Amino acid sequence: GLGLLKEGRILEMGGVEDEVKAVVNVMFGSATGNAEEIARRFHAELDGLGWHPGCIAPLNDFEAMKIGQNPSSSQNDYLIIVIATTGDGDLPTNALKFPRQVRKMTQKDSAALKGVNYAILGLGDSNYENFNNAAKRVDKILKTAGAASFCERAEADDGIGLELVIEPWQDAMFTYLKRKAPKKSLTLLPVNKTESTGKVGVEVEEKGATMETKQVTKVEGAGANVEELLAGLEGVPHALEALTMIEALANSAAPSGTCMSEAVRDDSVHRVAVRGCRLLTDKAYTERRVWHMELDLGAVDAQLKYEPGDSIGIVVENRKEDVTELLGRILLPDGAAGADSVCVLKSSSVNGEGGKTRAGPCSLRSMVSRLIDLNSPVKKTLLRSLANHCSEVNEAKALLTMCSKSGREIYTEKLRLEKLSILQLLRENPSCVPPLELLIDQVPPLAPRFYSAASASEVDASSFHFAFSVVQFEDGRRGLATGALEDICLQKMSSAGADAAHIEVLMRSHGSFSPPVDASAPYIMIGPGTGVAPFRGFLRQRRARGVAEEHGQTMLFFGCRHEDRDFLYREELEGFVADGTLSALVTAFSRDGNGAQAGGDETTASKVYVQHKMLEKTGEIGKLLTECESSRVYVCGDGGGMAAAVNDALVKILSDYGDGMTTDDAKKRLKEWASAGRYLRDVWFWGAL
């Protein structure tokens, strides 16, 4: 065929281009980069299936990408969506605008999406409630809008292994697309502009109506090429085409642009001062430290309006020593003299936004500090690309093996041991010298850390309170956010903390997770550990508004390890009970059982958690929830073990208390209450979706 250069790709013509430019678009909703990486993996395979690749973009860009709105191709367009479920069954931040955009499009034209054929892959974890709810919701929205599903929705389960569902679903979807591919295909082969240690060529084989590609990459110094190393390895993903590129500026003027990761690109970020802080746990309890921090919203108070139940996002940066280490191990962009060179991050032409500025002007050091998460696990597609930049054949082969089907167990084990960060991989593979563009493009974005409001704006004017538990790792390091926040607290509490410390924040509303508007509605709050923080805000607002006899009953279940070490906000909570703001405070101290008191091993002592205390109050809880239709249940904290155990306790309480109610009836009732806004949860997860 005739080879032409167009928009950074090699254009191979397998005959005359079709009059109808049918395309396959790929979109994603991703919290930590996993869904995005899988979506890009699918997008990279489309050429070989005989399709013209359409956009690759987040679902927030659904309207901008004009899905189904091209008159000449809408009846032939296909759309693949990969979406993770976050929070308590929520859409990821980069997919939140999707429902409103579809509604707007269909209100303007009811047939806007009737020519779109779609397939949805959901990523979730069956250990949590609302498993793959985001995928189910997107599926329903598209079906309601008139779009048609061409492949049954798949729900991958991180609890047992995502690939167990992804691989067979992918095979079935690809088989269908290959069968439906245009007879006269247009195959676009990516040109890897970031190759520095390798030389890339492309071999094209025409098979029937489609073309399949083989990528041949010479690894300098290894005496072998990647194709030879790939021999015998199945399931190795294609190297991805870059969505972004770095452009070094000719002058060395001081950087003046915004340098924010994709995770906060659609948010309004503000710089605020830290007003004060205090340690909530016992000073001697060094292995478990929880701090209370207060922020001064000051001049940006109007832009950061919040209600009890909302949360604030703290913009974080990678550790300075990690940034310095990475910059010393990679290739800088063309034209960049060093780590402090001023550059701009721009979109490539792949997602239809070629040349659009994504970050900068700012230094390369700032880009590495703020744009990518150096501690996140490296995805398999990046492993594939890293192999191209190894001069040692054994290292290249090890990386390729790890991202193949046969290397699944190796990859999973490294993931479990938290040894899959980009820095860890570069330490283990010293001959690997990748370009910075590759890492900025494929390492997951650095996401903000969210904390629930422990205050009420009508009481705590121009101030936002929150609590955080310091995350500590086995190697002695602390969490990116909690370590930095603790340092601020320590400085504030010392003589050296006279100067005001500032942090960057954004506000996130949690909608229905807020106190009932009807003051007569009774409600139960369950918040062990720092999960109690939002309920402090609930109760501060309730106290400020005054409590009358006709107001509903309130119960708070709080749990921690030791009554005398980490009973958070104890004086305030007991004060709420004393003045009638809180009807009942029920506590569970998991490490203060008989075994621990007798000097036995804490790990073997009888442990009592909030769910056990709830079962002790079956009569009170059952009566409150079943006899008052306006009653509510709020749960805040760990979305894994605690939330599941609390849900099981509620099921048992309802089935034991309800007249003839079975366990299945109780589960159904809780789901109905969740849909109606009577069972509300603000939970966090530790998965890698």
Image (spheres, grey):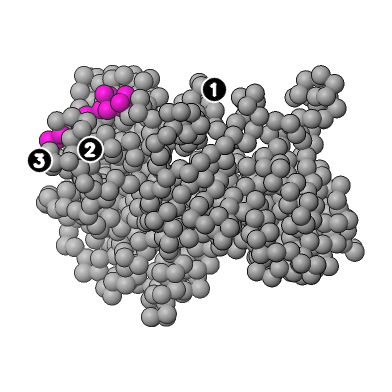
Q: Amino acid at mark 3?
A: Asn
Please give the label number shown on residue 363: 2
Front tag of 2 and 1: 2
Q: Which residue is mark 3?
A: 251
Front tag of 3 and 1: 3
Rounded to the nearest whole Å, what is the CA distance between mark 2 and mark 1? 32 Å
Q: Amino acid at mark 2?
A: Ser
* Residue 574 picture location, percent across and down: 75, 46
Cβ–Cβ under 8 Å for marks 2 and 1: no
Q: Is residue 316 shown to the viewer in this render?
A: yes
Crowding around mark 1 (Cα neighbors within 10 Å: few <14, some 14 to 19, many 20+) is: few
**494 and 72: which is toward the camera:** 494
Give the structural element (helix, strand or loop) at label 1.
loop
Sequence-wise, the earlier of marks 3 and 2 is: 3
Q: Is residue 468 left or right of residue 641?
A: left
| Residue pictured at 51% horizontal, 41% vertical | 276
* Residue 241 picture location, percent across and down: 27, 45
